[in-house]
Image (tube, rainbow, N blue to C red):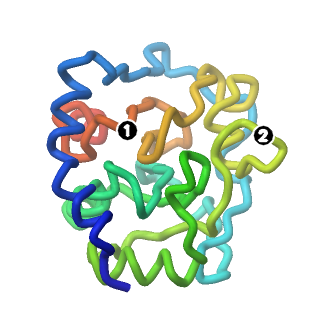
Amino acid sequence: MAMTIRQRILKMVYPLLTTMGKATGKEKIVKNRQVIAPQTPFYTIPLQLNNGKALSLETLKGKKILLVNTASNCGYTAQYTELQKLYLNAKEDLEIIGFPANDFKEQEQGSDEEIAQFCTVNFGVTFPLAKKSSVVKSAAQHPIFSWLSDKTKNGWNDQQPEWNFSKYLLNEEGILTHYFPPSVSPLSTEVITAINQ
């Protein structure tokens, strides 16, 4: 599935969005400075991928994990390219999982199959994508994002995704360590430093 004209324009606008995010101070990174452990273990949460297969999070123990809510028609959609580059550069030590969601301005209307095809054809994505779901606080919120945005579960953080391409980093022991807002590039110094800690 090739990009639409709108998607091509959004891809061109992406560098401007990240520059504006820096200039306006919207890059509020939240850190687990005291390394507070979760109340509910992360690895027990069920996850179904967009191909219908289940992924046991237990298999990711010992790796850092970057969880990102994604959308195909967003100004930040070009981050798929950066996420894929990060994945290829660090996949021995880092797992990336994308969570397509239609929570912000109807920016992800495709089916799981259409989303997977769009990501592969236009961005070469090879990291796992979850089944399309909701990531904001509601009765329909994906269990992983419920865990990520509830301090009674993860130990310290209540920040839900502000927009598409919000990023959450877990360490090798399943402890949530960082929240990165959408305007922070996956290849930024802040993200790379956090992954290498």
Residue at 51% across / 81% down in the picture?
A: 114
Left or right position of 128 against 78? right
Give the numbered dot on residue 182. 1
**Residue 138 — which label?**
2
Looking at numbered disc 1 in the image, what kind of residue is underneath it? Pro
The amino acid pointed to by label 2 is Ser
Cα separation between marks 2 and 1: 20 Å
Farthest residue to the front: give it.
Answer: 5
Secondary element at tag 2: loop
Towards the viewer: 181 or 52:
181
> Residue 143 in the image: x percent, y percent?
73, 49
In the image, farthest residue toward the right: 139
Quadrant position of the C terminus in the picture: top left
Question: Which dot marks residue 163?
Answer: none
Residue at figure coordinates x 23%, y 66% from the top left: 8
Depth check, front residue: 17 or 58: 17
Q: How crowded is mark 1: few (under 14 residues within 10 Å), some or many (20 or more)?
A: many
Residue contact at pointers 2 and 1, CB within 8 angstroms? no
Image quadrant in which you'd find residue 169: top left
Q: Is residue 64 above or below residue 20?
A: below
Left or right? Give the position of 152 relative to 186.
right
Residue at image position (36%, 55%) is: 94
